[in-house]
Image: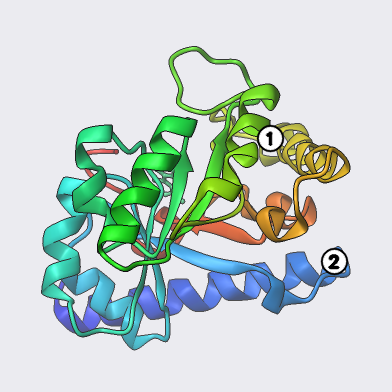
Amino acid sequence: MTETDLQSSVARNLEAVRARMARAADASGRDPASVRLVAVSKTFGIDAVEAALAAGQRDFGENRVQEALPKIEALGSADIIWHLIGHLQSNKVRRASRPFDCIHSIDSVDLLLKVDAAAAETHRRPELLVQVDLAGEATKHGLGHDEVRQVFEASPRLKAGRLVGLMLIPPYLDDPEAVRPYFRRLRELRDTLAAEGVSQDCLRELSMGMSHDFHVAIAEGATMIRVGTAIFGRRTPPA
Ligand SMILES: *Cc1c(COP(=O)(O)O)cnc(C)c1O
């Protein structure tokens, strides 16, 4: 693809995604401005991020620290909010703490405190989301209800990071309607945690919904959707 082809296809795709977001929000009586679009640029180059930037996109998501760092550095002066949406290993916490504004993948109290300590050292105040596992899939990252509550109970110990909500990667199902029960259960877990005394400030974000199912996620209360394919095209090889 030439640079102008890339520019116009990313711009066109972004417009279509925004229109779909607005329709989904309208249909469920929500303000479209209450849903943030995170453009997932993993496996795509700096040119793709620049194309989306030119089309007005500001939030970008990456799932691997080592892949993201060179991109973030190359785009250094651009006005971008970087989201880490993939698993964060303890040994990469220090490297991830400076460039990422929002980390969606907190999956233990230990990781929470490590990320917080690194953020305090680098004078950053990242937003942090707790990754939830509703399917009970032992191979996936993410926490069950009791463990999630324990992470929120550690919130008063934070010096720099701010817990702001929950994140979900549901099992992949072709039919977006089949994913709806997972989205609903994340919203219900949010409501349960609030009833159990977790502060509303810590529960304002629900990060859920990807290219093929984000309209359903918005109907179920998503405040952040993470969209790659529908903006940048198919990934080769898939990641
Ligand atoms: C890759 C990825 C996405 C984006 O998926 P698409 O289907 O390409 O929109 C969303 N969330 C996470 C955690 C991802 O790794």
Q: Position of residue 107 (x, y in %)?
A: 48, 32
Under circle 1, the secondary element is helix
Task: Name the side, left or right, on which 185 lies relative to 113.
Answer: right
Q: Is mark 1 within 8 Å of ligand 1?
A: no
Residue 47 in percent (x, y) is at 18, 73
Look at the image and name its color scheme. rainbow
Compared to residue 201, the image places residue 105 above or below, namely: above
Quarter where residue 195 is shown: top right
Which residue bears the numbered disc 2? 27
Residue 105's place in the image compared with 5, above or below, is above
Residue at the (19%, 67%) spot, across then down:
72
Residue occupying the point 88% across, 69% down: 29
Given contact means CB atoms under 8 Å apart, are the residues at marks 2 and 1 in contact? Answer: no
Front-lying residue, 171 or 153: 153
**Rendering quarter of residue 186:** top right
Is residue 41 among what the camera can see?
A: no
Q: Mark 1 packing: few (<14 Cα in 10 Å), some, or many (20+)? A: some
Q: Quadrant of the C terminus?
A: top left
- Residue under circle 1? 179
Can see residue 182?
A: yes
Residue situated in front as seen by the camera: 37 or 26: 37
Q: Amino acid at mark 1?
A: Val
Residue 177 percent coordinates (x, y): 74, 38
Residue visible at 21% across and 49% down in the picture? 94
